[in-house]
Each structure stands twice: as structure tokens, then as C-alpha cells.
Image: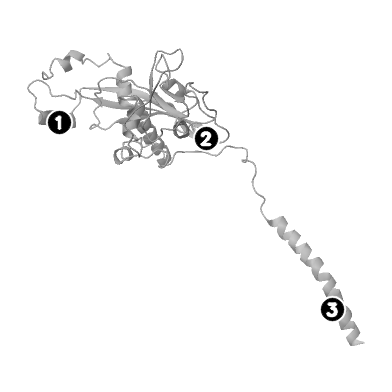
């Protein structure tokens, strides 16, 4: 009789064990946190890496606003490096600032149909239009919208450094686009912007003017000096003057806006571009004050 009861008890335990195990697994599943899918439709933020846009030591050490985050400061330095290479001196400055590994020396020329402007092929690390577009106009979430053949520089759903309204304006010199695609390659309208008086020896000054969760406005005050020896001034004296003084300043605005792809510049320029854009307002310094005192060639 005892053996019979033990056998029935053993059989019952075998039947109950799978049921209890199933209940336990259900309870554990109920306690497991469900994945948060609320932000799955939101595009991921995207920022350029050193591989996309390599900066030299000078660019890495460039002064940046202290009121920006480390990520925003890097963005500022990247934007400064790329913008100045393209628009400060010569438009082919990206060939010198970001040279190709193969050291190609000869340019190909291209004149679009119906245009009076001739473009030359780029010798930068972004000789391919796709490579250049990836840096200057990376789509962070969906598809890229490329320019039609021989068309102006068009961009995707998000930009790597600038907003979709600001960057196209930068690429237009008032008569024609500066950077275009032709046969899958990057071509550049070769032009120069004149003398540069920006004195990088004197640190730029940054002033925060407004800040919200999705917008940062600040100004940059840059310093300028006549870069050539004046009459009766030696080169050593000129160098000392440039290291310790300046003739005038310019203050210009910069705006950062938070987009679905991250922070992007909606207003940006460099000291040299600001000087060219504001030429003639030199706070009492006349151009003749520079050239009149310059040494004769």
C-alpha cells in the first residue's frame, strides 16, 4: 500500500513539474523589460569622424567656444577647416588642405553646356563626387538625393556640417555653383578671393548671445593686421608686430541648430570670409593706411 502511494505521488509530481515550469517562465517573461520602440522612427544622429574629415594638429588646436560641448567644439573645428579650405583663399584650397594620396598633378577641364564657366577636376582626397558628397552632405537616415549630371551641388536629407538651407547658398558665387558633379567626379570653379589680413596670432573671442534646447547663437570677434612689412619695417619687426598687435577687428554671427541628424550650422563663416564680406568698414582704418606704409616691391 505504501509503495502504491509513493508511485502515485511520483507520477503526480512528474505531471505537475512541466506545468509549474511553464507558469514560472511566463512570470519571468512578464518581468522582463520590453524594448522601448518609441524612438525607433527617429533618425540617428550623425557626425563626421577623423576618417571622413581628417584634421591636422593646427585644426585640432583651433580655439572653439568654451560654452559649447566637446562634440560641438569638434563640429566647429571641422566646419572651420572645410569652410576655410573651400572659401578663404582659392576654391581649390581643398586640394592643398586635404590632398589625395596619389599626388595627381594634372587637371581635367569641363565647361557645362550653355555656361561661360570652365571647371577643373579636384585633386583632393574627395576626387570622386560620391566621396565629396559623403562629407559635405551625408544623409543620416534615408536616401541621398544626388545632383543630375552636370548639375549643381545638391544634397541629401541631412548635412554633415551645415543645414540644408545654409550650405546650398555657400556653394553659389552669385553666378554659378562652385562645386559640381561631372561623370561621377568632383569639379571646381577655380577662383580666388583676394588678400587676407586675418591675424591668427591673436585668439578669436566668442560671445554667447542666445541658447535654447535646439539653437545656439554666438558671435566671433576676429583680429586683423597688415601682413607685409611697412616702410622702414624689417621682417623681424613685422613678425613681432603680428604676434603682439592688430589693426582692427570684425565681429560676425554663428548659429547652431539641432536637427534630426544632430547639431548643424545654420550660419557660419570664417575670419577671412567675414573680412571680405564687410570690406570698407574698418573702424577708422583706411586701406591707404596699409598700402601707403607698405614697403615698395
Task: Determine the CA span between mark 3 and mark 2.
Answer: 63 Å
Task: Determine the CA span between mark 1 and mark 3.
Answer: 98 Å
Q: Is residue 1 above or below residue 77?
A: below
Q: Earlier in the sequence, mark 1 or mark 3?
A: 3
Quickly name the residue at label 3: 10
Mark 1: which secondary structure?
helix
Quickly name the residue at label 2: 261
Residue 267 pos. (x, y %): 42, 25
Mark 3: which secondary structure?
helix
Residue 208 pos. (x, y %): 38, 30
Quickly name the residue at label 1: 239
Identify the residue at the far right of this view. Answer: 1
Q: Earlier in the sequence, mark 3 or mark 2?
A: 3
The residue at the point 77 percent across, 66 percent down is: 21
Task: Determine the CA span between mark 2 and mark 1.
Answer: 44 Å
Q: Is residue 116 above or below residue 185?
A: above
Horizontal placement of 157 versus 190: left or right? Answer: right
Q: Is residue 23 above or below residue 129?
A: below
Horizontal placement of 165 versus 209: left or right? Answer: right
Q: Earlier in the sequence, mark 2 or mark 1?
A: 1
The quadrant in which the N terminus is found is bottom right
Mark 1 residue crowding within 10 angstroms, few (<14) / some (14–19) / many (20+): some
Amino acid at each position: 500500500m505504501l509503495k502504491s502511494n509513493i508511485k502515485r505521488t511520483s507520477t503526480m509530481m512528474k505531471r505537475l513539474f512541466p506545468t509549474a515550469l511553464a507558469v514560472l517562465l511566463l512570470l519571468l517573461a512578464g518581468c522582463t523589460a520590453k524594448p522601448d520602440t518609441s524612438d525607433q522612427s527617429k533618425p540617428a544622429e550623425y557626425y563626421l569622424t577623423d576618417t571622413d574629415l581628417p584634421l591636422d594638429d593646427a585644426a585640432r588646436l583651433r580655439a572653439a567656444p568654451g560654452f559649447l560641448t566637446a562634440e560641438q567644439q569638434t563640429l566647429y573645428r571641422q566646419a572651420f577647416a572645410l569652410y576655410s579650405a573651400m572659401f578663404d583663399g582659392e576654391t581649390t584650397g581643398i586640394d592643398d588642405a586635404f590632398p589625395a594620396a596619389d599626388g595627381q598633378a594634372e587637371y581635367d577641364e569641363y565647361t557645362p553646356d550653355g555656361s561661360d564657366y570652365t571647371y577643373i577636376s579636384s585633386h583632393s582626397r574627395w576626387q570622386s563626387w560620391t566621396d565629396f558628397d559623403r562629407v559635405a552632405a551625408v544623409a543620416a537616415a534615408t536616401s541621398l538625393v544626388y545632383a543630375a549630371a552636370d548639375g549643381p551641388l545638391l544634397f541629401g536629407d541631412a548635412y554633415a556640417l551645415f543645414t540644408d538651407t545654409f550650405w546650398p547658398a555657400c556653394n553659389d558665387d552669385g553666378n554659378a555653383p562652385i562645386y559640381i558633379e561631372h561623370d561621377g567626379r568632383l569639379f571646381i570653379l577655380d577662383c580666388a578671393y583676394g588678400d587676407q589680413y586675418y591675424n591668427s596670432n591673436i585668439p578669436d573671442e566668442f560671445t554667447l548671445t542666445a541658447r535654447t534646447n535646439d539653437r545656439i547663437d554666438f558671435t566671433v570677434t576676429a583680429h586683423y593686421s597688415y601682413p607685409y612689412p611697412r616702410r622702414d619695417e624689417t621682417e623681424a619687426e613685422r613678425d613681432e608686430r603680428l604676434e603682439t598687435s592688430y589693426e582692427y577687428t570684425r565681429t560676425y554671427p554663428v548659429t547652431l541648430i539641432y536637427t534630426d541628424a544632430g547639431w548643424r550650422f545654420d550660419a557660419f563663416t570664417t575670419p577671412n570670409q567675414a573680412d571680405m564680406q564687410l570690406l570698407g568698414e574698418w573702424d577708422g582704418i583706411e586701406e591707404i593706411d596699409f598700402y601707403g606704409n607698405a614697403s615698395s616691391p
